[in-house]
Image (cartoon, helix red, strand yellow):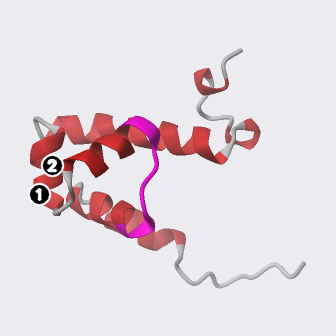
Amino acid sequence: MNKLSNINNYEFMTSNEIAKVIGKRVKTVRKKQFSSQKIFAQHIGMPEETYARFERTGLISFTGLISVARGLENLEEIIELFAKKKEVIQW
């Protein structure tokens, strides 16, 4: 069974495989709003090659991911990942 065929089973995927799934999901969202990688890359101020590599491989800097999220109007989802939690579990 291909690990990418069950994209909800992240526990058994490598970080690179998860990144690739995210890149493909972003591509799907981007295509609904922008007709090309080039136009979207210009919209977020990123070199087209960098953005194209992200869609293909999932590899991008954290600041690049923030730019992508902002460009797709999903920045709040990234910020929410690092929101201060009221309940902290002590290990």
Furthest residue to the top?
1
Q: Secondary structure at mark 1?
A: helix
> Which residues are the magenta region?
56-63
Residue at point 81% right, 78% down? 89
Residue 57 falls in image quadrant: top left
Is residue 80 shown left or right of residue 7?
left
Task: Give how far across and how far down residue 29 sits, in percent.
Answer: 28, 40
Location of residue 65 (image quadrant) = bottom left
Counting from the top left corner in percent of width and height, residue 9 is at 68, 35
Residue in the picture at 17% in, 61% down: 44
Give 79 or 36, whichever is nearer the viewer. 36
Three-letter amino acid code of the residue under disc 2: Phe
Q: Where residue 73 sits: x, y (%)?
A: 24, 60
At which x and y percent is residue 31? 20, 35
Query: Label 1: which residue?
Result: 43
Left or right of 52 in this view: 3: right
Label 2 to label 1: alpha-carbon separation: 5 Å
**In the rendered image, which quarter contains the C terminus?**
bottom right
Identify the residue under disc 2. 40
Q: Is residue 27 left or right of residue 41?
A: right
Q: Quadrant of residue 37?
A: top left
Q: Is residue 10 above or below residue 86?
A: above
Residue type pointed to by label 1? His
Task: Name above or below for residue 48 compared with residue 46.
Answer: above
Other residues around mark 2 within 10 Å, as few (<14) / some (14–19) / many (≥20): many
